[in-house]
Amino acid sequence: IYFTSGGTESDNIAILGAAHAKKRAGNKIVTTAIEHPAVLNTMAQLEKEGFEVVYVQPEADGNIPKEKFDAAVDAKTILVSVMAVNNETGVLLPLKDIAGMIKRKKAPALFHTDAVQAVGHVPIDVKAMNIDMLSLSAHKFHGPKGVGALYMKKGIRLPSYVMGGAQERNRRAG
């Protein structure tokens, strides 16, 4: 667990870090069209850097069938980043199914979820759901504003984007 200033910073560290760490394995990233701006704006930056970003579209009811993810993820996908719960509709995304697709397709992808709207409200089990990285924000479950965290599965190595001291195991100075 790495402490950050909130969900946005956690999303940025996970998404930028994973894309840059895995770019030798490919340049395809899969996300959804209904992500929070913290994710969508980061994806736009990665597109400017030459990454291919696939935006899976929701159905009219806001749900995204797992078949749409199945069509988007392939053996060249290096990152899948989807929110756990949509902040506007309340739709829960099929995290465990998405993680299973990544594994079944033998993609080198890391799996990230923006769980800001989920943590403290719906069950999240990073091990059972095969989540590699999870972003959260404390104020969404009665914690202080300006405090967030990024869970990273043991063994994941990402570049640091906040330079300074050795805080947070050299992942986030300050």
Image (spheres, grey):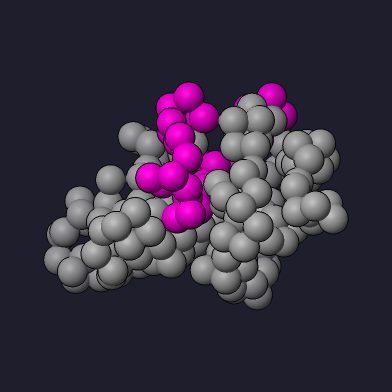
Image position, residue 9 (x, y; %): 39, 66
- Height in image: 41 above or below 70? below
Residue 46 position by quadrant = bottom right
* Depth check, front residue: 84 or 74: 84
Residue 171 seen: no
Q: Position of residue 103 (x, y in %)?
A: 63, 27
Q: Tag count in the figure?
A: 0
Relative to 157, say whether 127 is above or below.
above
Quadrant occupied by the C terminus: bottom left
Image quadrant where residue 88 sits: bottom right
Percent coordinates x, y for residue 32 in the rendering? 69, 56
Q: Nearer the viewer, residue 146 or 39?
A: 146
Residue 41 in the image: x percent, y percent?
59, 73
Q: Is residue 114 left or right of residue 154?
A: right
> Which residue occupies 28% across, 45% down?
1
Decide which of 4, 102 is in the foreground and name it.
Answer: 4
Specify whether 101 is left or right of 96.
right
Extent of the magenta region = 103-130
The answer to whether 79 appears left or right of 124 in the picture is right
Q: Main secondary structure of the magenta part?
A: loop
The residue at 20%/54% (across/down) is: 168
Q: Is residue 122 above or below residue 18?
A: above
